[in-house]
Amino acid sequence: MQTSSSLSSSSSDSKPQMKEHCDHQVDCLKMIQLILDGEATDQQLARLKANLVSCQPCIQMYHLEQEVKELLTKRMEKKCCPEQLVATIKSKILTFS
Ligand SMILES: [Zn+2]
């Protein structure tokens, strides 16, 4: 057994620098919602894709929005009874009080 303890620092990778803060998050959110609604133009799609490569908060926002939308779509398809949902929320509120 050989333990190769070569500490290769991966800090010098040629990855694009990720932005931790988006300067145009409101615009990005609008575009993300347009795209998830299927109403974005090809131009808007291309612009957002280019932005997502380097914009950390927008990637997270995109995935979040996508998940929420998927969840809502599934719920509509299954026609999950809202009464049960209300009951679940109520019981959760009760445990907090
Ligand atoms: Zn952005």
Image (cartoon, rainbow, N blue to C red):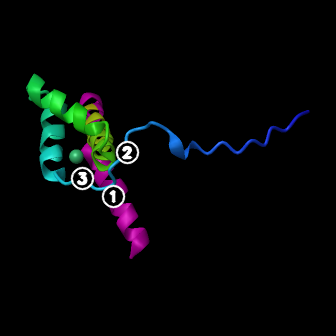
Q: Position of residue 37 (x, y in %)?
A: 14, 32
Q: Which mark is residue 89?
A: 1
Q: Quadrant of the C terminus?
A: bottom left
- Label 2, label 1: how many angstroms apart (C-alpha)? 42 Å
- Report the magenta stretch's main SS: helix
In magenta, the rendered stretch is: 74-97
> Contact (CB < 8 A) between labels 2 and 1?
no
Which residue lies under the disc numbered 2?
Answer: 17
x 36%, y 46%: residue: 18
Q: Position of residue 2 (x, y in %)?
A: 88, 34
- Label 3, label 1: how many angstroms apart (C-alpha)? 34 Å
Q: Amino acid at mark 3?
A: Cys
Q: Disc 3 or 2, which lies upstream in sequence? A: 2
Residue farthest along the front direction in this orientation: 12
Q: Which mark is residue 66?
A: none
Q: Is the CB of the residue bearing disc 3 within 8 angstroms of ligand 1?
A: yes
